[in-house]
Image (cartoon, grey):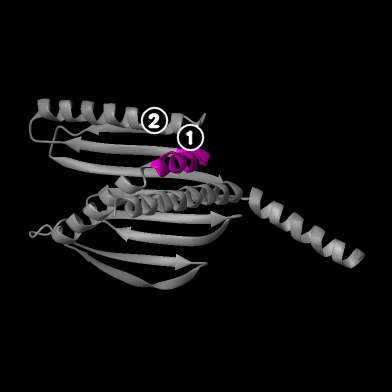
């Protein structure tokens, strides 16, 4: 009995430790000259468990986009994923997403709860904008700065964070320019992920049952 009790105690302590441990998400995005990449890294207890590199490719003449995603899982290379996006494919995906949003609107508050569970540790977003006319550059920079300010304020309020994000928009009056660099570090406890995921799953199943009953009653 003592051995069984000791094993159970170890299991319970391990589960509690895992539930209260944090997952850290690091996001870096660069759009400047020839370097156009997005890097996403997920760490648990300072161990890299996931890393994805997504080159941001310019649009082709037919408005299609080719993307190659490079993954790492637990420091092991995963075969690259080649994807080809056409306007028709993106339009189909938009309609699918719209249907999902329309049918799962009640789940959105629970998704927001997941966002609120994150803690913001670092956020820096620096951009450089410029067009041919100086007055248009000034208007564009002012508009971009206002949008960034509102977006950062909304993010801080939603996450209930005390961190003050850094953002800047630099004008380029010499030549047309579009450059941007983003750094963001977030963390969330595994227990919060599980709790919110179960809440979303429960409400989604409840919504599916309600929609099924509605269709049955109308038929």
Q: Main secondary structure of the magenta part?
A: helix
In this orientation, which residue lies closer to the viewer: 203 or 142? 203
Magenta segment: 106-122
Q: Which residue is mark 1?
A: 159
* Residue 161 belongs to magenta span: no
At x 46% / y 42%, what residue is drawn?
110
Percent across and percent down for residue 3 are 89, 67
| Residue 35 seen by the camera | yes
**Which of 55/193 is in front?**
193
Answer left or right for 119 relative to 84. Answer: right
Which residue matches tag 2? 154
Q: In what element is the residue under mark 1? A: helix
Extreme-right residue of the structure: 2
* SS state under label 2: helix
**Quadrant that contains the C terminus:** bottom left
In the rendered structure, does residue 108 fall within the stretch colored magenta?
yes
Sequence-wise, the earlier of marks 1 and 2 is 2
Residue 91 in the image: above or below residue 173: below
Q: Is residue 30 above or below residue 69?
A: above
């Amino acid at each position: 009995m003592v051995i069984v009790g000791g094993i159970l105690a170890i299991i319970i302590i391990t589960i509690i430790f895992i539930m209260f441990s944090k997952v850290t998400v690091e996001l870096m995005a660069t759009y400047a000259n020839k370097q156009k990449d997005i890097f996403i890294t997920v760490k648990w207890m300072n161990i890299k468990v996931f890393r994805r590199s997504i080159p941001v490719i310019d649009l082709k003449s037919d408005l299609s986009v080719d993307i190659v995603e490079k993954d790492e899982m637990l420091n092991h290379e995963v075969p690259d994923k080649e994807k080809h996006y056409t306007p028709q494919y993106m339009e189909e995906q938009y309609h699918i997403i719209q249907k999902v949003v329309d049918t799962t609107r009640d789940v959105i508050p629970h998704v927001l709860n997941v966002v609120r569970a994150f803690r913001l540790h670092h956020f820096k977003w620096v951009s450089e904008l410029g067009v041919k006319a100086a007055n248009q550059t000034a208007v564009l920079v002012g508009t971009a700065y206002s949008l960034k300010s509102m977006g950062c304020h909304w993010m801080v309020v939603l996450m209930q964070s005390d961190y003050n994000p850094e953002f800047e928009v630099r004008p380029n009056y010499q030549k047309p320019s579009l450059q941007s660099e983003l750094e963001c570090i977030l963390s969330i406890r595994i227990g919060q992920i599980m709790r919110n995921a179960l809440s979303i799953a429960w409400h989604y199943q409840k919504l599916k049952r309600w929609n099924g009953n509605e269709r049955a009653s109308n038929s």
